[in-house]
Image (tube, rainbow, N blue to C red):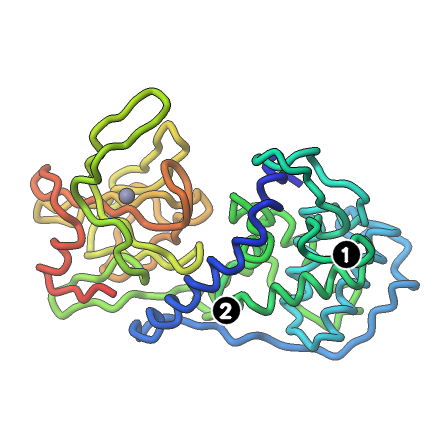
Amino acid sequence: MSDNKSWVTTTAFVAVPVLGFFSLLGVALLGGASNANACEPGTTSSFTVDPENVPTEPIAGFGGEQLKNAAIIMTAGQDMNLPDRDLGIAVMVAMGESSLKVLPYGDDAENPDGTPNTSIGLFQQQHWWGTEEERMDAYDSSIIFYEALEEVTGRASMEPTAVGNAVQGNLDPQHYASSWAPAVEVAEALSGGMIALDPADNGECSTTGDTPGDVTPGGWSAPTLGPVTSPYGDRGNLCTPAGCVPDFHTGSDWGSEACGAPIWAIRDGVVTKQYHDSAGGRGVYVDHGEGVEAMYIHMYDSGIFVKPGDQVTAGQHIAETGNTGFSSGCHLHLEIRVDGELVDAAAFLIAMGVELP
Ligand SMILES: [Zn+2]
């Protein structure tokens, strides 16, 4: 549970349609990127979990009623014939939402818009998810959760926490990340060892955990999968309660159909330093040689795979898209300087022969 829970559940009902839109976009993009690495849905194992006969010893700190509820969540997933991984994701989300307890209340009395928060149950579902009876029933609320989960296109290639986020609509896509490993432990134990999930699962299904970008004969790569959603240049005025200031966009933004999309080094180079800003933005600077320096930002610390001093090669999967700093959704902000002068990053890459999605 988190302090932004009220917003979480308020946004849940809009998050799914919005994501659906981006998923459609994502399909088109993935189709054009030959190196895109779509994962298989994963194994659907056959096993029986008996909610009335769960281990008496706690698993990963969860015991008694909590394990019984996890067993019910898994049973519902099996009844829907879903892959093992989806069962683990449901357990993870219920851990993050209710600590696996059928709570008759939510975190906050009110949503940000002043309407009453109606979150209840294992998944902290508000009233639009179902009747009170359904939401307070471990099995029924699980079915409701899985029905929304099934709408998340390409979820096998997304981080577990990002899948949970897509269903629940949290502000922070990493909200469930810390619950994944304990959920794996609980799900595996309750299945009697019949399922095996990866505690380090990051949605990258290849055995190398790497999704390289396409590199042009001239040695350049697109920076990520998505299209440019906000170009370099003048964006009019940026207004806050303190007043308005001219907003010049110093980079190009590439949208991300899901958080965690690969970010590729645009050319060979050396990571020179980390990027940190006052709003919590994270990223890296890479010296790509011949006077070209690039800044890649908005990633999570956990989504940055290189450090200062590292050599990188064009197309190397150096990071994944995140939503830190001045950012209202997972994307990559890429800034390029040539001999210290800012340039339009997207236009620069096109001039270098990179085909942008
Ligand atoms: Zn930007």
Provide residue 7's location: percent of width, then percent of height: 58, 40
**Residue at mark 1:** 131
| Quadrant of the rendering where the N terminus is positioned | top right
> Residue visible at 43% across and 56% down?
260
Provide residue 332's location: percent of width, then percent of height: 32, 50
Report the side of 170 relative to 273 (left or right). Answer: right
Amino acid type, mark 1: Thr
The image quadrant that residue 104 belongs to is top right
Amino acid type, mark 2: Thr
Helix, strand or loop for disc 2: loop
> Residue visible at 40% across and 60% down?
257
Above or below for 29 versus 106: below
Helix, strand or loop for disc 1: loop
> Disc 2 versus disc 1: distance between alpha carbons?
26 Å
**Residue at mark 2:** 153
Provide residue 305's location: percent of width, then percent of height: 39, 50
- Dividing the image into four quarters, tell me where ligand 1 lies: top left
> Residue visible at 15% across and 57% down?
349
